Image: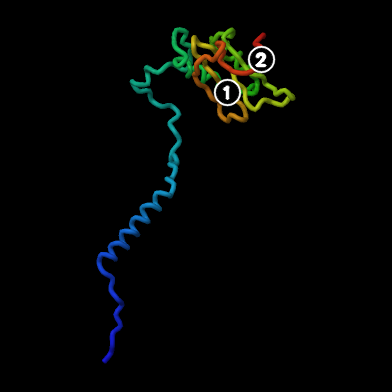
Amino acid sequence: MSRSRREPSRPPARRRGIGLGLVLSVAVLSGCVPEPTPVPTAEPDPSPTVTASETSAPPVDALIPDGSAEDNLPFFSSIVGQVWASDARESGRAYVDALVAAGFDKAAMQVTEDLSTVGNRAESLQFSVRWGQQCLVGQVGPATGEPFATVTDVVGDGACLLGQTRPIDW
């Protein structure tokens, strides 16, 4: 008589509990895996078509004297980008001069120093144009990475930039 060896069977409820625990563990752990970052597969079209909704956007090639600071931010940003792409990218005066040439009011501008107090190149340059009760503010430099432009409210004494700025006396 041969005895067959049988493994003890588990009750069905216990097997379901183990299975459910395994499913929940996988679900919880899968939430810990970071989502993959999509990678573009093709170069963007260099000449995108303009749709009807985009035609109402402010132009980036002209100052809008009667517009708001927000209306003029795209144009301000484009001027900042042009100077940033030039050899004069580390000169606060170059940003001021380019903005003046584009029609912005020099008397409404502020700019920080190009050099630190010990004569090193500034890690960041800031410049601004007061526009009513708001300011168009740009920031560039090695510490900034890409040029940055934004609209902020006027601060304290009606200035756009806090701290010491240099006189725009040229």
**Image location of residue 67, percent across then percent down:** 44, 10
Q: Nearer the viewer, residue 77 or 17?
A: 17
Q: Looking at numbered disc 1 in the image, what kind of residue is underneath it?
A: Gln
Please say whether residue 44 is visible from this viewpoint: yes
Q: What crowding class fits label 1: few (fewer than 14 Cα within 10 Å), some (14-19), or many (20 or more)?
A: many
How far, Cα to Cα, is label 1 from label 2? 15 Å
Q: Which residue is mark 2?
A: 166
Mark 1, residue position = 139
Q: Which numbered circle lies on residue 125? A: none
12 and 124: which is toward the camera? 12
Residue at image point 54% right, 25% down: 148
152 left or right of 116? left
Q: Amino acid at mark 2?
A: Arg
Image point 65% across, 20% down: which residue? 91
Q: Position of residue 117 (x, y in %)?
A: 72, 23
The quadrant of the picture occupied by the C terminus is top right
Residue at (37, 56) in percent of width and height? 25
- Residue 158 as seen in the image, left or right of residue 122: left
Find numbered disc 2 in the image and state the secondary structure of the residue it sits on.
Answer: loop
SS for dot 1: strand
Residue 163 image point, x, y percent: 62, 18
Label 1 close to label 2 by CB (< 8 Å): no
The quarter in which the N terminus is drawn is bottom left
- Between disc 1 and disc 2, whose residue precedes? 1
